[in-house]
Image (cartoon, helix red, strand yellow):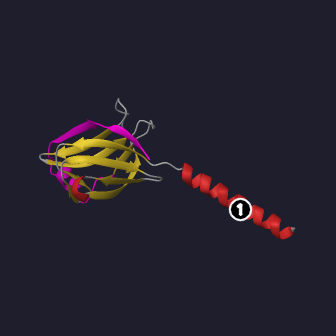
Amino acid sequence: MKKIAKQAVVLGCFFVVVVVVSSAQTVGLRVDIPFNFNVAEKVLPAGHYLILAPQGQTLKILGPNGASALTMTNPASASRPEGPGAVSFNCYGRRCFLSQFWTARTETGQEVAKCRLEKELANEKEQLAVITLRATSYQQ
């Protein structure tokens, strides 16, 4: 009898873990980016992208022809743009860097830390232009 009770407890714990894991959802955005851009030091081509924000502070960027990148983020300090989602870029001349990511489900976006190259361009007093693109929600 003790053996059956022990197995029932183990089985019950297993189902709790399965339910918790399956309820964890990845949210993200679909966005068309009409220019090449940097994620940290990596240059990605213009195209249709899926930007995923799984658990934690990591963005996974998936694009055309297998283009992809991962980057760490922090909570964004800027105010939320209108619409279901948005992606912002800091552009210095013809070089654009992924800067912020906002989904429809959050009031606080995620901000990508500036890489060495972006800091150099900013220190050289390159003119900064911020480009914000509207995006559609994605939920897995």
In the displayed image of the protein, which residue is found farthest to the bottom?
Answer: 3
Give the magenta part as a residue range.
113-140
In the displayed image of the protein, which residue is found farthest to the top?
Answer: 82
Residue occupying the point 22% across, 38% down: 131
Is 119 positioned to the left or the right of 74 in the image? Answer: left
Q: How many other residues sit within 10 Å of disc 1, few (<14), some (14-19) or many (≥20)?
A: few
Q: Which residue is mark 1?
A: 11
Residue occupying the point 32% across, 53% down: 61
Figure quadrant of residue 6: bottom right
Which amino acid lies under the numbered mark 1 shown in the image of this protein? Leu
Foreground residue among 81 and 5: 5
Q: Secondary structure at mark 1?
A: helix
- Measured as percent of width and height from the top left, residue 21 is found at 56, 55
Residue occupying the point 56% across, 49% down: 23
Any part of residue 77 in sight: no
Is 91 positioned to the left or the right of 25 in the image? Answer: left
Eyeballing the image, is 11 above or below 38? below
Figure label count = 1
Figure quadrant of residue 129: top left
